[in-house]
Every structure is written in C-alpha cells, then in structure tokens.
Amino acid sequence: MTRRTLVCWLLAAAVVATLALHAGAQETTVISVWTRLSQMELVVDLFNQEMERQGRPLRAELTMLGAPNEAREKFTIAVAAGTPPDVISSDVVQWPEFAEQGMLLPLDRYADRFHLDEVPGGIVDAVRWRGELYGVPVIPDLSVLFFWTRLFEEAGLPSTGPETWDDLAEMAYKLTQPSKEQYGWDMKVIWGDGWYLFTFLPFVWGNGGDLLDPEGDRVTIWSQHRVPAEEAVTFWAEQVTRGVNADLHPSGHGFWEIAAAMRIDGSSVVNGILERERDLGEPWGVVPIPRPAGGNHSSFLGGDAAGIPRAARHIPEAVEFLSFAMSYEAQEALAAAGNVPASIAYFDNPYFTQEPRLQQLALALLNARTVKTLHLPRIYPPFTGYLRQAFEGQIPAREALEQMELEINAAIAQR
C-alpha cells in the first residue's frame, strides 16, 4: 500500500467514524402527551418500547391533567400561551369546543393512518366537527347495564338480564325488597348533570327522540321529540314511584355494595366489577341498555378522544403516536386493562375472547353516540333540575321537558 493510499484510507475511516458518532449522538425527539385518564400511560409505555425496539430517537412523555374540567382549563391556558402539548387526550364531549375555537389540527389528511375502517360510524362522528376529523376515539367509555346474577336467580329471574323497558321494570320490581335493604335499580337520580346524559339520554335515543337539533345549537327535545322524550321521562318516574330506586337505601348503599341488583354505568368499570367477582364470589352480567318495545338499544359514548393542537411542535411525530394509539397492539393493551377497544375488529383479542360477557360491549359500541354541542354548561342546570323534579314526581314529564327546552334555548340565545 502506497503512502497516498494509506492516507486516503485513514481519512475515509475518520469520516465514517465521525458520521457514526454523530448518528449515535442524534438527539431524541420527545413528544408531550397530556391526558386525564391513567390508561393513556399504557399507550405511552408501549409506544416508547416500540420506538426503542426500532432504534428510533423518538419518545413520548405523559402529563396527567386531573378531572375533565381541570384538564380543559389547563389545555385552554396552554393553547392561549402558545405552549400546547403535541397530543391532547380529553373528554370527548369537549371536542366541539376545542375544534370550534381553532385549538385542534384537522386530521382528515392523515385519516388513513388511524385504523378507522371498522370503528362504528357513530364513534368516528364523535370526533368530527363541522364535517372535519379532529381526533381519534382512543379510549371509549360506553353506558351499559350491569347486574348481579345471584340476586336475579334468588328472585327466580333469568340471569340473562333485561332486554326491554318492560323487562327492566318487571325485574327491578321483583328484585326490590326494602325489608332486606335490597333494591332493583341503582338509578342515582340524585346525581344529575353528565350522569343524566350518560344514563337517561339513551332511553330517549332508543325511543327515536333526541335532545338537540343536528347542529347542536338548540334543544328540541319537546318541540320535535315530544312523544319519545315524554315516554322516557315517564318510564323513569314510574320506577322511582314504584320504589325500586336504590337512592332510597337508608345507608346510601347501592350496586357496588350488592344492595342493588342493576346499574347503568360506564364500560370503564369492568375491572372494578371483575375484582368484586374475584374477591366476593359475586357473578355478574352485562347487557346493552334496555330498549323500548319496537325501539332500539342505545348507549352514550364518553371516554377520551385524542388529537393534535394546531401549534404542536412535533406534528408528524404526534400523528405517528395517534396511529399507534389506534393500532391493535395499543388497543389490546387497553382491553387487558378492561377498556373497550374502539374498533369492532379489535374485540377478537385474548382478553375479550376469554371473557364472553365482554362481547356484549361490542353491541353497545355499535349503537353508541355522544352529545355534540358548544353549550353543555348552559344545558346542565335546567336539564338536571327539571328532569329530577319529573323523576321524583314533583312535576309532570311534559312540563319538565317544555320548561327545560325554553330555559336552555333562552340561555343559548343570550350568550
């Protein structure tokens, strides 16, 4: 080897070494993910593991935000200050407000990366606003009816649970034994607000009615949906009158204390009910919210959607994170933690196939929807106040619905 050749070889080797050193020292991109739900930690951890497996300098960092209103306030302040996260995960009912105020990035151009093919249309619609996609339904929470099968069997009732309103009324009555401090239905009429949306509104939807106009700008529950809404309110009021409501329990006990046989709740409590079964030996069942005769099952979609703020620093990386969050791998991990997968295709996971009762949640996913409006703060007080008066027999159903609609629409008009 000549001296010149040796020098060239050494120079080339030095260049290669320098490039390798530079590549090895490549700075890691960290995307910030804000959420109110601890389940998102599973997704973040899996995402980071996948990036490490691929040898990529990309990681996600999680920040917990607290309750829905607290999460909304922190996100709003961060956007106003120009310091939003790269990914925001928050209550799906807040999505219209975020989109309307220009806080979120439209995502239609990336939609083919989000595994939405077998996500039911009502679920995808929840993260659309004015025709545009603004997020992905990463952690759905569906309202369904849970029940304790032992109490059903002791009352001589089928352990398959109620299918219709009539079934629900009959079973709740037969399951109620005040002398034993046992009630048929843990209704929680005393709660109101979002609880009424989650548990009562599906009775209106299943009966062919609605709360709002299609744009979410006016309440039309009385003017356009009088009969189905009045029937739903009357049904609830009749159950309270018949004394089946566990709100009457002298010690405040209900479903979770096995003092009530049935309760409408979110699919997110599955882990809690499985734990009760393991610890107490109490078998349970779950069915969609009962339907009226000739009507349909319906479910309220809650839980979290995830999206990308317009001023996010790492948009391509945030898109990749959302894609991963909606993948089978991430949704399977969420299913293992008791959450409902967002896609029907993902119900074929080892956790749901080993627990056939959870397949009932797929039926709820097919019929789930949410309330899309900018006016929830104006809706809640009259919605809760008038409905509670009707449920407790203080005013007729028609008066409650008419006055509720008038008061809410007056408040919306004055905004």
Image: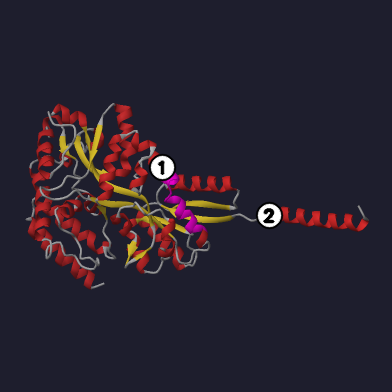
Residue designated by label 2? 23
- Residue at x-position 9% and y-position 38%: 170
Occupied quadrant, residue 225: bottom left
Marks 1 and 2 close (CB-CB < 8 Å): no
- Total labels: the figure holds 2
- Examine the image and state in which quarter residue 382 appears: bottom left
Q: Callout 2: helix, strand or loop? A: helix
Residue 407 to residue 355: above or below: below
Q: Position of residue 128 (x, y in %)?
A: 33, 62
Q: Which amino acid does label 1 sit on?
A: Glu
Q: Where is residue 188 in the image (x, y as percent from the top left)?
A: 20, 45
Residue 304 in picture, x, y percent from top left: 36, 53
Q: What residue type is labelled 2?
A: Ala
User: Which segment did they paint magenta?
Assistant: 317-334
Q: Nearer the viewer, residue 8 or 196?
A: 8
Residues 279 and 126: in front is: 126
136 over 260 or under it: above or below? below
Helix, strand or loop: magenta stretch: helix
Please name the residue shown 89% across and 54% down the image: 6
Q: Is residue 10 magenta?
A: no
To which residue does mark 1 refer? 332
Give whichever of discs 1 and 2 has the lower sequence position.
Answer: 2
Query: Quick one: label 1, few (<14), some, or many (20+) residues within 10 Å?
Result: many
Q: Where is residue 146 in the image (x, y as percent from the top left)?
A: 23, 39
Q: State how far apart marks 1 and 2 are (Cα).
A: 34 Å
